[in-house]
Amino acid sequence: MYNVDIDNRIIAGNCVDIMKSIPEGYVDLTVTSPPYDNLRTYKGYTFPLNEIVQELYRVTSVGGVVVWVVGDATVNGSETGSSFKHALKFMEAGFNLHDTMIFQKTNPIPQIYRKRYNNIFEYMFVFSKGAVKTHNPIMIDCLHAGLELGSTTYKNYSKGEQKRTKIANPVKKQKIKGNIWEYVVGKKSEDQEAKGHPAPFPCALARDHILSWTNVGDVVLDPMCGSGTTCREAHLSNRRYIGIDISEEYCALASSRISSLNYIVNEDTSQLI
């Protein structure tokens, strides 16, 4: 049911306070990326992880999903491990850890750490509230399409009789994509719109998760929406969106990106700000 007070809006404010106004079980999917480690203080505001996780659990529908995109800083020669601490917090709150996915950057920024390989990925933890209710898997071409595997005969060895013969089907043309997703960062025109934000993730990343875990008309939340990438892609995919950010500057950027979209959508499921 469409909620005029929160649907298809970018809202400036504390995400914990604003999420408290969202009805319980209202959100089908959250795609977000929290401030990392030394960025925990964000424009003077702290990052209340426990409260955010608790509210996300409350507002997520049964079978709904939270995609938490997070990495680790390296401090004094050691990775912080904050990403794993976050995952444990979600599980303590009642979420299932449905999948640990990888966001691999095809054009990572070179790093200057000595005795360390260049970091080229972030985690995409996929949490679910109970069993996942929607999965529209992304399919990719299969390298071995058409290959016919040999048949296998099963016997009842206790009686020395043949039980049945199983003939394997030819390998199909497509298969479900793996859980390591590669993206170029900051180069596509759709991503260039977010230049005012220091750490936007690719539009394609948000789009792939939205298409995977929701259907048309579902509600997509980003409680730390920054430049509005998740909301932009939800709008283009004909899903309802709720974007929240503590920064009025970023909220203005997010609203501008969505308002500039030259796209016609069904008024029952989406509208421009």
Image: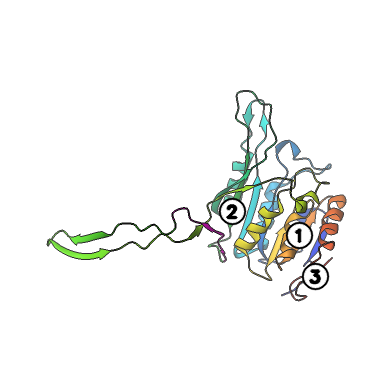
What residue occupies the far left of the structure in this picture?
Answer: 159
Residue position marked by numbered label 3 in the rendering: 271
Res. 214 image quadrant: bottom right
Q: Which residue appears farthest toward the top when viewing the image?
A: 114
- Is 88 situated above or below 217? above
Check the image and report above or below for 109 versus 9: above
Q: How is the image coloured?
A: rainbow
Q: Secondary structure at mark 1?
A: helix
Judging by the rendered image, the residue that carries numbered circle 2 is 126
**C-alpha separation, residue under disc 2 versus residue under disc 1:** 20 Å
Seen at 39% across and 57% down, the residue is 147
CA–CA distance in space, label 2 to label 3: 28 Å
- Can you tell which mark lies on residue 232? 1
- Magenta-drawn segment: 134-144
Q: Is residue 103 above or below residue 115?
A: below
Amino acid type of the residue tagged 3 in the rendering? Gln
Magenta part, dominant SS = loop
Q: Which of the two labelled residues, at mark 2 and mark 3, occupies the earlier sequence position?
A: 2
SS under mark 2? strand
Residue 250's mark?
Answer: none
Is residue 161 on the magenta stretch?
no
In-front residue for pair 266/131: 266
Q: Percent x, y for residue 89?
A: 61, 47
Q: Nearer the viewer, mark 2 or mark 3?
A: 3
* Dot 2 and dot 1 residues touching (CB under 8 Å): no
Count up the numbered dots. 3
Q: CA distance from mark 1 to mark 3?
A: 12 Å
